[in-house]
Image (tube, rainbow, N blue to C red):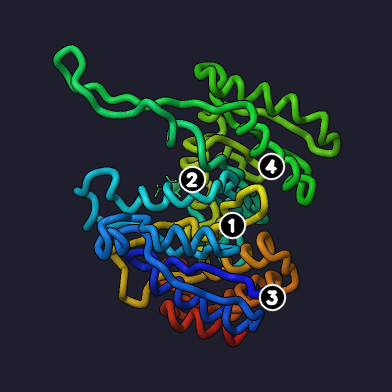
Amino acid sequence: MTKKICILPGDGIGPEITAEAVRVLNALNLGFELETALLGGAAVDATGNPYPEATQKLAREADAVLLGAVGGPKWDALPREQRPERGLLGIRKDLNLFANLRPAILYPELANASSLKPEVVSGLDILIVRELTGDIYFGQPRGIEIREGERFGFNTMHYTESEIRRIGRVAFEAAQKRGKKVCSVDKMNVLETTQLWRDVMNELAPEYPDVELSHMLVDNAAMQLVRAPKQFDVLVTGNMFGDILSDEASMLTGSIGMLPSASLDQHNKGLYEPSHGSAPDIAGKNLANPLATILSVAMLLRYTFNLEEAAGRVENAVKKVLAQGYRTSDIFEAGTQKAGTKEMGDAVLAAL
Ligand code: IPM
Ligand code: MG
């Protein structure tokens, strides 16, 4: 049966970087059927809904989704339900993509792009496993109301033990294939929800005797990530802490423009997207770095389709263009060859 991939270019630089990733996907000649749909601001402009029904249908039918990025100042003043971000949260929830994998890898060629000393980050290879469909992001009740004569804002943080257990398993299983260490991040000294998080992680640990489990409070984790990031192998945490720590971890590598991500359900159906945003300031200027999206294609091949060899080919092609000296402006340094979005895509295709 033909395998379907739903392409969601999104907003800002999304369409440009997705175009390069699609060229890579086509060049691999794996017989995928690709269909494009709208998400985010582009969808709001066309239909009034950031996750329109046509997109829902396509995304549900597809085996995998490849997303560029959503959002931009143009839509910031809209009511909350119509903001582009709501489209992204909507598709994550709709497809039950509870497991967000965000690798932070330092490519040796880019060691100087990091704001940390090379000896602190060289060889860095962390995997952040972020829970993506629960927590304060989705908790009810929520809102802004008038109470006792003044405005009152509120959100609700919660996790069920089964939600914690399933993301915990993803982290332990990922660690088994890597450095065999899981650090679970919580705020159990203050928040009951995260006390439960820690308890459930401890209950799971005996099922994975080959993996060493440790725990860290989120404030300390934020500090340790810049103090000694190489102590981490797999880091597992809830939706909100994971949002924050994954941005922090990405910058250890010098450029968020290099980092892919996967969001998976129980059956390895996945949505793949760069970890960065839509960068409206450089949209349409052939300046964006397409490598994170191209590397998201590699994750798509690996996690949804089990095509390890093809995934490796894409990753090696990226390593090759870096070794050849091609750099988009976000990772440019003296002595390297400046490339635009398209030229970077050309170089990756040539390396393939
Ligand atoms: C991310 C983003 C999103 C999030 C926003 C755009 C809703 O920051 O994917 O990390 O907070 O999850
Ligand atoms: Mg984020």
The residue labelled by disc 4 is: 171
Residue type, mark 3 in image: Arg
Per the model, the C-alpha gap separating discs 1 and 2 is 12 Å
Residue sitting at x 51%, y 40%: 133
Give me the disc on residue 313: 3
C-beta proximity under 8 Å, tags 3 and 2: no
Secondary structure of the residue carrying tag 2 is helix
Residue type, mark 4 in image: Ala
Q: Is residue 189 visible?
A: yes
C-beta proximity under 8 Å, tags 1 and 3: no
State the image coordinates of residue 265 (x, y, percent, origin top left): 61, 49
Of mark 3 and mark 2, the one earlier in the sequence is 2
Of mark 4 and mark 1, the one earlier in the sequence is 4
Of mark 4 and mark 3, the one earlier in the sequence is 4
Is residue 24 shown above or below 250?
below
Q: Is the CB atom of the residue marked by disc 2 within 8 angstroms of ligand 1's nearest atom?
A: no
Per the model, the C-alpha gap separating discs 4 and 3 is 25 Å
**Quarter of the image that includes the C terminus:** bottom right
Q: Neighbour class for label 3 at 10 Å: few (<14), some, many (≥20)? A: some
Give me the disc on residue 340: none
Residue nearer the viewer, 163 or 175: 163
Is residue 36 shown above or below 39?
below
Per the model, the C-alpha gap separating discs 4 and 2 is 20 Å
Per the model, the C-alpha gap separating discs 3 and 2 is 31 Å
Residue sitting at x 69%, y 65%: 305
The residue labelled by disc 2 is: 93
Is residue 66 shown above or below 23?
above
State the image coordinates of residue 139 (x, y, percent, origin top left): 43, 30
The residue labelled by disc 1 is: 270
